[in-house]
Image (cartoon, rainbow, N blue to C red):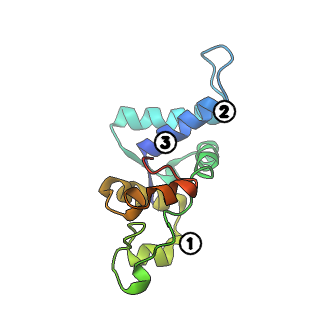
Amino acid sequence: MAAIHITDLEAAINWWRARTPSADGVTLAPPLRALAEVYAHMAWARRSEVEESALTPEAWAAWLAWYDTTPDTPCIAICSTSQGDAVCKGCGRSFDEVQHWPAFSPAEKRAVWRRIRAEGSAWRFNRYAERAADGGEVASK
């Protein structure tokens, strides 16, 4: 199983905070509470990742609700792996990642997204950033 990075957990928490703001400034909605508990344990243990399997069913459902709002694939329809490149110039994924993408778990997909953003060399982040933005993805995200 893959791990969920703390930055994705933070994004999910912030998404839920915007969706279900606290009426009294203290009480958290159940999905937000479930994610906050995971986040607190990670912070206390000084961990940057948590295994998907370690999430409670409530935290997993809350994280998946946020995940469903993110773009599924980094593809911008310029696939150089079909031309023999080991890494796609368009999206930054390896040939294996492109081929096996549908079978990846949500956390595995987010790990690839995190890596290609950190590298920032794929065309989706420079030459064709507007194409990526048109597909629902913000290039600086």
Please state which of residues 74 and 77 is positioned toward the viewer in this rendering. 77
The residue beneath circle 1 is 102
The residue beneath circle 2 is 19
Residue 135 at x, y percent in the picture = 57, 58
Q: Amino acid at mark 1?
A: Pro
Label 2 or label 3, whichever lies nearer to me, is 2
The residue beneath circle 3 is 9
Q: Is residue 129 left or right of residue 21?
A: left
Q: Residues within 10 Å of mark 3 (few under 14, many from 20)?
A: many
Q: Are marks 2 and 3 in contact (CB under 8 Å)?
A: no
Residue 10 at x, y percent in the picture = 48, 37
Q: Amino acid at mark 2?
A: Arg
Residue 137 at x, y percent in the picture = 53, 53
Q: Are marks 1 and 2 in contact (CB under 8 Å)?
A: no
For image coordinates 49% across by 42% down, the residue present is 9
Of pointers 1 and 3, the one earlier in the residue sequence: 3
Q: CA distance from mark 1 to mark 2?
A: 29 Å
